[in-house]
Image (tube, rainbow, N blue to C red):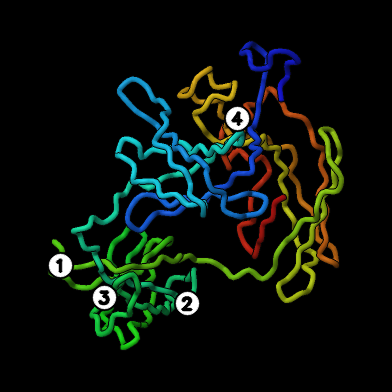
Amino acid sequence: MSTAAEQPTQQRKDVATTYAFVSVSELGLMQRTAPAGGTDLWTLNRRSGQPTPGVTVQPLYYSYNATQTAVKAGQEVVTAADGHALYPALEPSERYTAGLLLRKGADSLVVTGQLNYNRGVGRNEQPQERPVAFVYTDRAIYRPGQTLYFKGIAVQPRNGRSEVVKNLKVQVRLHDVNGQKVQDLAFTTSDFGSFHGSLTLPGGLLNGQMQLQVVTFSTGTPTGEQHLGGTGFSVEDYKRPTFFVTLDPVPGTPKLGDTLSVRGTATAYAGQAIDGATVQYRVVRRTIWPMLGRFDGDFGFGGGRIGLPRPYSPGGGGEQQIATGTAKTDAAGRFRVGFTATPPDEALNEDAPRNPEDDEGYRPPARGARRTCSK
């Protein structure tokens, strides 16, 4: 789309042009990291999902030097009768993949993806088989002073399978939001490789994301400890909500300058309507640009050769507040928000970041239960 009827790609004053790419191809690609190093590739037919043999796959990777960045083509591989091909591990200089080029006959497709540059385990090397612990908590969020219940299971890979680890001495450690150790609990895994316990979350600490970490003692590490796993959870002074707010869909296709009426409902989780509640609303206009992604290829806009990036849309602009006010819910919990969809005010800097202190007339209530909703 462009504001110019002719030569939209030519850069000149007062001309704005934006574009997006559309891929048309019957080729598809699936991939995974190969156990022995490199990347397993499977090419498929997008219509039937069946394997597509004879497809040439070629990576395009970023090449860096002291003065410039370019996109170069890597080694080609061709898929077999089952649509599979093994791409060898990339060299360190090729690890930054820009995309993958698929070709078969007149059909071609560029897809985004990464190839594995890990060379896997050599023939004379043995993979490190160390135990791993999986930890689960009874909830995802707690209040300070509440009891946290947890359970874990320790397993160890052996010959491509996982076995539970019996009679393993482990320590479960509570870490605060700054990563400082708060508490230690010692356990020995059962015949099923499991352990479980509880702890009381202390008060007086900074709220936020805390961690449970599981370690065991090992003489083969510099610290004498081996980290097995862990999990995170939130600690907040939250209040359990008693009601929720929903907004009805906006009918039709509103245009700038239209007067709109948006209706909503406040309902208790027990099912009854919330009547007589104060509704405080704020209406903003936000500029949203399309996200076009990134690929350093030339499709007519990038400057004439591979290696020059195409234009990149920022994805979003600033906000302008156009209405604020209050309303009351009726006996059915319904309320209405009315406003006019005013056009942008060019005198304001719409791309400036929003400062909550500048929201004229909008202040959340200091006391009482409150819920928010947006559309």
Secondary structure under the numbered disc 2 in the rendered image: loop
Is residue 284 visible in the rendered image? The answer is yes
Disc ID at residue 351: 4
Determine the CA span between mark 4 and mark 2.
Answer: 44 Å
Please name the amino acid that badge 1 sits on.
Answer: Gly
**Mark 1 or 4, nearer chain start:** 1
CB of mark 4 within 8 Å of CB of mark 2? no
Category of crowding for the residue at label 4, using alpha-carbon neighbours closer than 10 angstroms: few (below 14), some (14–19), many (at least 20): few
Label 1: which residue?
224
Determine the CA span between mark 1 and mark 2.
Answer: 30 Å
Determine the CA span between mark 3 and mark 4.
Answer: 51 Å
Is residue 319 visible in the rendered image? The answer is no
Label 2: which residue?
138
**Which of the two residues, 25 or 219, is positioned nearer the viewer here?**
25
| Quarter that holds the N terminus | top right
The total number of labels drawn is 4
310 shown above or below 48:
above
Disc ID at residue 171: 3
